[in-house]
Image (cartoon, rainbow, N blue to C red):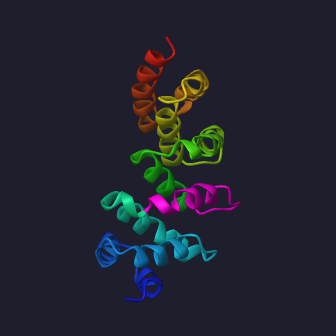
Amino acid sequence: MDIRKQLLVRHSKENTNLIVDYIGDDRTRFQELIELFLSDNYRVTQRAAWVVGDAARNRPELVDEHLETIVLNLRKPDLHVAVKRNTLRILQEIQIPESLWGEAADIAFDFLTSNDEPVAVKVFAMQVIHDIALNVPELAQELIFIIEDQMPYSTAGFKSRGRKLLKSLKKLSI
């Protein structure tokens, strides 16, 4: 299968599953997918983001060697929201190595405090920071402040995740 061509066939769950199944646990195929995900082609990166997210959820070990690259990719200007959302979704579901805590937290704080990011990106960013704060408790107070500041103006999804994380964070900061 030509992964790039298949990504461009259509943007659907069925097509995503087809590509994820093709990749399986093959590191070479996953490497090809990551290269497409990191490319500068807007449509390709958008569609690859969904596949990367699902493939990483099925086989988290495949993403390990690419973690630094995909975290740093979040610094790219004008990044498609699908890339942000799916990268943060991956980061909230895995154990981020200590060497990436600072970079991942910094990027996540930028997304969380931005007025331009959609709610899903903010919610995933909030979770990433929370998970890092479990190991770096000094981040807890800053995250508590930001969540409490944004909750009155946020969506139900943000409020729901925010309440859950505040409860956990307040136990940390006691």
Residue 15 shown left or right of residue 91 in the figure? left
Quadrant assignment for the N terminus? bottom left
| Magenta stretch in the rendered image | 63-80
Residue occupying the point 48% across, 78% down: 32
Instruction: From the viewer's side, name the closer residue of 47 and 96.
Output: 96
Within the image, what quadrant is residue 102 found in?
A: top right
Q: Is residue 161 above or below residue 50?
A: above
Instruction: From the viewer's side, name the closer residue of 54 and 163.
Output: 54
Q: Position of residue 94 (x, y in %)?
A: 41, 48
Instruction: From the viewer's side, name the closer residue of 26 and 122.
Output: 26
Q: Position of residue 127 (x, y in %)?
A: 47, 38
Q: Is residue 114 above or below residue 80?
A: above
Within the image, what quadrant is residue 137 found in?
A: top right
Q: Position of residue 156 (x, y in %)?
A: 42, 35
Residue occupying the point 36% across, 65% down: 55
Residue occupying the point 33% across, 61% down: 59
Would you say residue 66 sits in the magenta stretch? Answer: yes
Within the image, what quadrant is residue 2 found in?
A: bottom left
Q: Is residue 169 above or below residue 131?
A: above
Residue occupying the point 63% across, 62% down: 79
Would you say residue 140 sits in the magenta stretch? Answer: no
Q: Position of residue 152 (x, y in %)?
A: 54, 25
The residue at the far top in this view is 174
